[in-house]
Amino acid sequence: MDRLDEMSAFAAVADGRSFTQAAKRLGVSGAQVSKLVARLEDRLGARLLNRTTRDVSLTDTGRAYLERARALLEDFEALEGSVRDETGPQGLLRISAPVAFGAKQLGPALLDFAEAYPEVSLEVSYADRTVNLVDEGFDVAVRIGQLTDSSLIARKLAPVSIVACASPAYLQARGAPQTPAELAGHDTIIDLNAREPYVWSFGQGGQSLEARVQGRLRFASAEACLQAAERGFGITRAPDFVAAERLRDGRLSTLLCDYQPEVIHIHAVYPHARHLAAKVRVFVDFLAKRFAGEPEWRQGWC
C-alpha cells in the first residue's frame, strides 16, 4: 500500500504540475506529498520530476513511468469500484454547475436524486468558471455552451435558447426592434458570461445573422441582466431557463420572434475512466432522463 500511495502522489503532482495542488486533491499535507514522491524516486533510483520555484515538470523517465503507473492506478480503482458497486451507487459525489442553472433548474433535480439514492452523498459547487475536474477532484460537471476540453466524456442533456427580451415599459417608450440590425439603435444590457458578449446571433432561412451591440450596463450574470431589463434599462439576451418565468408572467416580453434565437446545449461531463463509478453513471442517467424531451422552460415564451 505504501507503493500505491507513492504512485498516487506522483501522479497527482504530474497532473496538477504542483505539489500544493496534489496535496489538495489527495487531502493530505504538501509535506506528505513531497515525502512520498521523494521516497518513490529514492526507491527507483531515478529522478521523475524537474522542480523549480515556479513549476514542476516530468523528466523523460517520469513521463514513461507515469504512463504505466496511471494504468495500474486505474486498474486498482476499477477493482475497488467493482466491489463497491455490487451494493449499488454509494459514496461522495462532487458536482460542479453554473450558478444560474443550479439555482433555477438543477437544485430541485439534485434533491430528487438525493431522495432516490440515499447512499450517495452530494457536494455541489456552483460557479460560472470552468473548473478542472481532475485537478479539483470533481466527479462530474454540468456545462452550458461550447465544450473545449476534449479529454472529457460529454452527455448532451438539453437545448437552451438565448432569447432577446425587454420590459413592456421600455418597449412602449422606445419601440421594439423588428430586425437584429435595429438593435444598434437601442440600449442593451450585456451578459459578460456569454461566449461573445457583444455579438448577438440569430438565424433566418438557414442563414446566421449577427448584431454587434454595446451597453452601459454589463454584468457577468444573466439574472442581473434580467433584473436590469425588468427595471426598463434596455434590451438584454439571456438563456431561456433563466428568463422563462418573467416571460410567461409578462414582466418581460420576447423580441425578434421572426428570427431563430441562438441555441446552445447543456452537457454533463466527466473524466475518462476504465471503470465508471456507479454513482456517476446513475447521476448522469438521472439528469438525461430528467431533462429529456422539450424542457419546460422552453414553453410559452414566444
Image: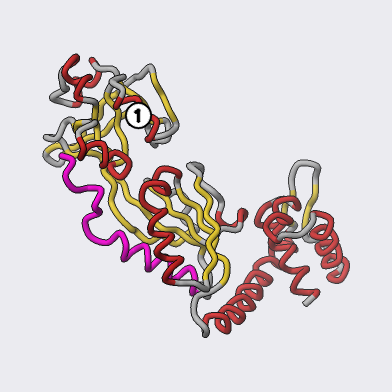
Would residue 301 be counted in the magenta stretch?
A: yes
Q: Which residues are magenta?
A: 278-302
Residue 275 left/right relative to 257: right
x, y percentage for residue 41? 84, 65
Tell me if residue 153 comes above or below residue 229 in the rendering.
Answer: below
Residue 158 left/right relative to 5: left
x, y percentage for residue 234? 28, 21
Would you identify the image quadrant in which residue 210 lies?
top left
Nearer to me, 207 or 266: 266
Mostly what secondary structure, the magenta segment?
A: helix
The residue located at (32%, 28%) in the rendering is: 199
Nearer to me, 251 or 272: 251
Q: Amino acid at mark 1?
A: Gln
Would residue 176 be counted in the magenta stretch?
A: no
| Secondary structure of residue under mark 1 | helix
Tell me if residue 121 comes above or below residue 108 in the rendering.
Answer: below
x, y percentage for residue 181? 19, 22
Tell me if residue 4 comes above or below residue 51 in the rendering.
Answer: below
x, y percentage for residue 176? 16, 22
How would you rate the neighbour count of disc 1 (Cα within 10 Å): few for under 14, some for 14-19, many for 20 or more? Answer: some
Query: Mark 1 = which residue?
Result: 227
Q: Quadrant of the C terminus?
A: top left
The residue located at (38%, 48%) in the rendering is: 144
The residue located at (23%, 31%) in the rendering is: 252
